[in-house]
Every structure is written in C-alpha cells, then in structure tokens.
Image (cartoon, rainbow, N blue to C red):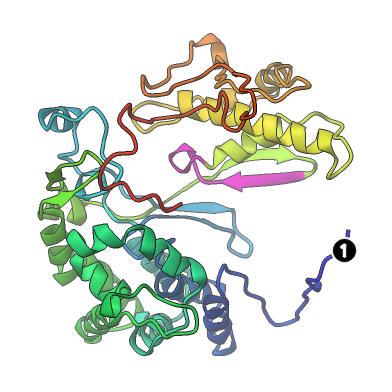
Amino acid sequence: MFTTRPTLQGTFGMVSSTHWLASQSAMAVLEDGGNAYDAAVAGAFVLHVVEPHLNGPAGEVPILLAPAGGEARVLCGQGVAPAGATVAHYRGLGLDLVPGTGPLAAAVPGAFDAWMLLLRDHGTKSPADVLKYAIGYAEHGHAPVDNVGATVETVRELFETEWTSSAEVYLPGGKAPRTGELLRNPALAATWKRLLAEVARAGDREAQIEAAREVWRTGFIAEALIRQASRPTLDTSGERHTGTLTGDDLAAWSASYEAPATYDWNGWTVCKAGPWSQGPVLLQQLALLPPELPAYGSADYVHLLVEGCKLAMADREAWYGDAAEVPLEALLSDAYNAERRTLVGERASYELRPGSPGGRAPRLSRYARVEAAVERAGDAAGAGEPTVAMSATAPVPGEPTAA
C-alpha cells in the first residue's frame, strides 16, 4: 500500500499525539531533559487547551504505562459516581435515565489527579515545568482546528443560556472560534497560574505535586467545581437540575494503579484498561478472529472485523458495568469466542446479540432497543440499526448533537 506519510525514526525520542502543538510541547520536554512521562503529562495539558471539544482536566483518563524493566500497569483516572448519585435520587427527581448532560451526569473528575500521580511516580519535572506550555497557549492563544468552532456552533444556544462562562471563552464577541484566528482561554491560564503560586512553597518536586493534588481536591478548584455542580442547569431531561457532587466526593477519591486486562494474540500480549474503560472490547475482538484471516483490506476482511466488533459490543452492553463483577475471563476465553464466531454469516447482522459466558443469561437495559432488519424501498440507511440507551423522547431539549 502507498502512503504520503513517511516512516519516522529517531535515536533520541519521538512523540505522537492528536495535535501538533501537544506533540511539539512534549518534544520540548524531552529536549529539556525530561523523560517520557514528563512529556506525556505536558502534552496532555496542552491537549486540554487546543482540543477542548475532546477532553479537559476535569474529565477522565485511562493510562497504560510500561516502565523500563517493569510490568505494564494501568493508571485509573476515571472518577467514581458521587455518593449522592443513587437510583433513588434520580427516581425522586422523576428521571428514569441519568441525563446525558448537565451536573447530574458528572462523575468525580479524574484526569488531573491521574496526570499528577503519573508525574509524581514516574516523572522528573515539577508541576510548573509541565504546565508552562498549556499556560502559554491558553494565555496567548493558538489557532484552533476547524472542529473546535464547528462543535461550539452545535451548542451555541446551550452556552449562551446555560453555560455562560463557557460562552465567554468560546464565543468571544458572539462568534465561534475560526481557523486562523487566535483562541485564548485566560480563565484556564489564570487557574493554572494560581495553582502553581499556591504550591510553589510546598517544598521539593514531589511535595509540590502532592500540594497540587490537594488544591484540586479541597482547594479553590474544588470549591469552584462544587459551586458549578450546585447551580440549576438545563440537561437532557428538558429541566434544570443541580448535581450531586460534593466536597466529600472530591476529597475522598484519588487515581490508582491496577493490573491491565490482557489477551495474547499472534505472539503479542495486548494490554487494555479494565471493563470500567470498555477497553477489553478490543481484546475480545482479537479473540473473535479466526486463525486464518482473509486478505488484508478485502471485503471479507472488513466484514469479519465489523461483525466481530458488533458481537464484542453486544457483550459489552450485557456484561460490562460497575455494580457487579464482569466475567472477563469467560468473555475472553477461546471456547466462548469460538462459539460466538459461528454467528458471523455472509451478510451483515442488524441485531444486538449478547452471549452467555458460563451459561449465564445476558441482561440488557430496558432501554436497549433491538430492531429487526427491515427492507425499505429506496431507503435502507439505518434499517434495523441497534439503538442502545435511547429514550423514547430523544432527541430532548438541551441535548448537544456534537459527536
């Protein structure tokens, strides 16, 4: 196959990310004597600035790491649900589903703590060393990619009426960000500057990192998060609700290490984060592959991969979750997937078909709707497509349509 992308090689170091400014910043860290972990943390915080439509410091992050001479590990940066986010609480509000947006949908934010923990345990740089790049682009601006402005336009009304502080940043002068025009985020730059000022007197590098984690959990950042969560805000229910996130939730949670989920395939051990990340879906897709694959890129090859993906996703819908143990060993076993593989026929399936690992009956949410394939004259697009966790009233007011 031909490509316009050259093969890249190096003897010093190499960085890859989804945005050139993040890669550039991470490479600068390496050139300044930092290690791969320092570079990863610096690049991540730049991504929060330049790809705000995709991620942020109050989001979540599953991190896979393989220290030199050590075993592969997972750093879980996925926060838990607040203690008050109970079934009874949501039903008491007249809700059958957790709204897809707004403060009721918020988990304890995990990304910042995870990146700081990675820096503390495996890096060599201080918080100021890794945050300076993000501060620079937030304060002085960067040229946004097209999708930033396009995404902001899809939520313009929501920003202008509900998330007014976001409108101040992403709709300056009432205009969405445009390619070629500098986009600034002075509020984020000021937040990181204040954090660094507060931790500067903490002592050595590790003490500063621990102080930064504490500021996030109990300091001025935590206070701002709680204020926002307690503000009634329109969500996908079409009503305004306050969130359940409290100071106790923030103070009690921290990122943690765990063993990865693994699958041995074609001489390689493939590692993913646990079922809380839905990462093992990829491992099951590998387990579903037959010993002999069709020619790469052929129609049969694509068909096999797509149908296997559907089967693994169906098992995700039935078996993944946080409230009970996930039967991961059975889901990745050779015998189970050999049986599942027989479901791949010559035609594409339009059914959601979870399996029964260990003989247990699959359990799907009552909101999982499986439609039989329907032939539509002149319009077969979407016929029989499985739709998961979709309420009968969707789309609902306040629902962002951004992908």
Which is nearer the eye, 364 or 240? 240
Q: Position of residue 373 (x, y in %)?
A: 60, 19
Helix, strand or loop status at disc 1: loop
Few, some or many C-alpha atoms within 10 Å of disc 1 (few <14, some 14-19, many ≥20)? few
Asked if residue 269 lies left or right of residue 160, the reply is right
Asked if residue 254 lies left or right of residue 163, the reply is right
- 362 relative to 2, above or below: above
Q: Position of residue 394 (x, y in %)?
A: 33, 34
- 180 relative to 380, above or below: below
Q: Tell me if residue 276 is in the magenta stretch.
A: yes
Which is nearer the eye, 396 or 70? 396
Q: Position of residue 194 (x, y in %)?
A: 21, 82
**According to the image, label 1 marks what residue?**
2
Q: Quadrant of residue 87?
A: top left
Which is nearer the eye, 268 or 107? 107
Q: Quadrant of residue 71?
A: bottom right
Name the residue type under label 1: Phe
